[in-house]
Every structure is written in C-alpha cells, then in structure tokens.
Image (cartoon, rainbow, N blue to C red):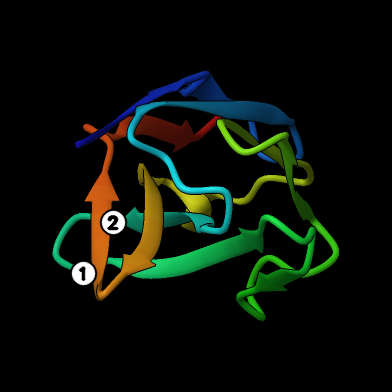
Amino acid sequence: QVQLVESGGGLVQPGGSLRLSCAASGSIFSINTMGWYRQAPGKQRELVATIETSGSTNYADSVKGRFTISRNAKTTMYLLMNSLKPEDTAVYYCNLGQTYLIRREYWGQGTQVTVSS
C-alpha cells in the first residue's frame, strides 16, 4: 500500500504564489509517476502536471509557464504555483501510479487552493 499526504494549500490573492507538497510512504517502486490533479466545484477532476522518476514532466496547457512540478528522490513531490488565477481554485490531489504486473493508482486526500481577492 501507498499513502500520500498533501500540504501547502490555502487562500491566496490573484497573482500570488503557493507551493504544494506531497509526501509518499509505503511500498513505493523505484520507477513510478507522480502527479497533481485538481477538481473545481461542479467539474471533473483534471490533470495539472506529472513527473516521472526520470524527471520527465508533463503539464496541462492551462498551467504551462506558471506552475512547476518537481520531486525529491522518489517519495516527495512539489508543485510551485505562480501567477495564480481565480480559475485555479480547486481541491488539488496528489497521485502516484506504479506498475507491477498491473497498474495501481493511489490518491491523497486533497488540499484546497482558493485564489480570491
């Protein structure tokens, strides 16, 4: 089993910055994908960014140039969010995916990010 714990959410004004963290523990393989997803009220959960253990990254078009995903070894991941907009308001979820015979996905409990003046 894998446990994921997010932290760093909160209330920020438009144009401000926040950094989210995700700490992973448990049976984590040496090769995996970690990512951030978000879900706004009344909307489906959507991809924000992912990062492989190799360091390869992928971003949603809506956050490119504003958000930066990074990770420390294989167990801690960060999301630096700059130039935040009201439309970035959502619950942000940490995700870890790894494969051994089958693909398993794990989720954190989520952390609220609110961008408002």
Instruction: Name the element at disc 1.
Output: loop
Q: How many marks?
A: 2
CB atoms of marks 2 and 1 within 8 Å: yes
* Quadrant housing the N terminus: top left
Structural crowding at the residue carrying mark 1, measured as other residues with C-alpha within 10 Å and reported as few (<14), some (14–19) or many (≥20):
few
- Residue 111 in the image: above or below residue 105: above
Structural crowding at the residue carrying mark 2, measured as other residues with C-alpha within 10 Å and reported as few (<14), some (14–19) or many (≥20):
some
Q: Give the residue pinned by disc 2.
A: 40
Using the image as rendered, state which of residue 109 and residue 1 is in the foreground: 1
At horizontal 14% and vertical 64% (from top left) the residue drawn is 42
Q: Amino acid at mark 1?
A: Lys
Q: Amino acid at mark 2?
A: Ala
Q: CA distance from mark 2 to mark 1?
A: 5 Å
Residue 89 position in % (x across, y down): 43, 46
Residue 115 position in % (x across, y down): 52, 37
Instruction: Name the element at disc 2.
Output: loop
Residue 25 position in % (x across, y down): 38, 24
Q: Residue furthest bottom?
A: 61
At horizontal 57% and vertical 29% (from top left) the residue drawn is 20
In the drawing, does residue 41 fall left or right of residue 63? left
In the drawing, does residue 69 fall left or right of residue 39? right
* Quadrant housing the C terminus: top right
Q: Residue furthest right?
A: 65
Q: Residue furthest front?
A: 101
Q: Give the residue pinned by disc 1.
A: 43
Query: Which numbered disc covers residue 76?
Result: none
